[in-house]
Amino acid sequence: MFSYLLASLAFVFLFYDPVTKYLTAGQEPQRLPRTPRPQINESLLAIETGNETALLNCSPDAYSVHILSKAPLVVYIENFLSLDERKHLLQISEPLFEPSTFTNDGQQTRRDILIRDSEVALIPRTHIVRCIEARARSFQGWRDDLWIERLRTQRYGPGQHYTHHFDWGSSARGWGRLSSFMVWVEADDIEGGGTEFPRLQRNGPDQHWCRWVECPNPDSANPGGGETKKEEGEPITGVIFKAVPGNAVFWENFRPDGTGRGWQEAWHAGLPVKRGIKVGLNIWSWGRLSS
């Protein structure tokens, strides 16, 4: 019975998307209707009033950006967090860490260390945290109908990981988790623990990107631990971001065509940590899908 279940799951993962595309070939994807905002638990969102925003006194942003992909939009960000911000996040997270869980339906959660093994902390909205929230929103152009979810830190020790998954879930009634930031807070003397996007393609010379991503080994038939390069000049499929403290990667989860279709290239995983401790900061944005 167990082997039958594994075979069924393998069929779903390998053939569901190609079969769906074949059956719907030639059909124009339907746009989602514009609907009112659904009822949401506002305690899970970082909502600011006009007065609170005006009183928020944050230091000027000092990060720099590098576009890795345009479709989907994936941007690498240097120095997204300052050293003081990183220290503050570690301090406020320490007493709050608890075993991580996950959900398949957006409601009920469960724990399964074969899928997700880490510790997570829902951190309080201190002044520094609210400035990080504001930075994430301004990075996206202060879009209407977009809110930053309450920030969470995640801690991974040796052997801990998060298997491949999507952040976007469903796009019920034209609303969903629009984008994600993966921000590295701590990763000193770490081995492993990269963030892998096996379906994402990368162009650009290695001498620039090798600072932040695992690069192909020219002597290996399977370069980069999963990255493949067919011919010279062809894009590399499969990207593993190194855990570099203070830096971040941003990506959009949905196609900007109003259909509610998520990017398959946004499928990603937190690879197992082999040595050391990794602490990451999840910044998710929830709101109305673009039309």
Image (cartoon, grey):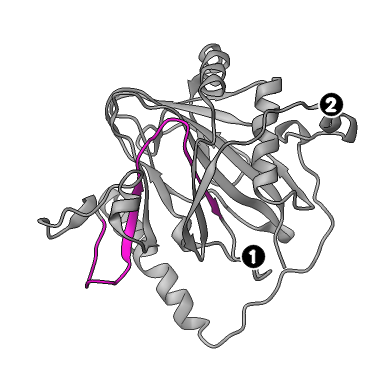
Label disc, if present, on residue 55 of the rendered structure? 2
Disc 1 crowd, CA 10 A, few/some/many (<14, 14-19, 20+): many
Q: Say which of marks 1 and 2 sits in front.
A: 2
Residue 248's place in the image compared with 93, above or below, is below
Quick check: is 243 in the magenta stretch?
yes
Q: Which residue is mark 1?
A: 260
Could you tell me which secondary element the residue under label 1 belongs to? loop
Q: Position of residue 205 (x, y in %)?
A: 31, 60
Residue at 69% over, 29% down: 131
Would residue 150 be seen by someone viewing this image from the given angle? no
Of mark 1 and mark 2, the one earlier in the sequence is 2
Give me the C-alpha separation between circle 1 and circle 2: 36 Å
Give the quarter of the image for residue 198: bottom left
Residue at 55% over, 19% down: 84
Residue 214 left/right relative to 65? left
Disc 2 crowd, CA 10 A, few/some/many (<14, 14-19, 20+): few
From the viewer's side, name the closer residue of 154 and 2: 154
Q: Position of residue 173 (x, y in %)?
A: 73, 60
Give the extent of the magenta segment. Answer: 227-252
From the viewer's side, name the closer residue of 260 and 218: 218
Amino acid type, residue under disc 1 in the picture:
Gly
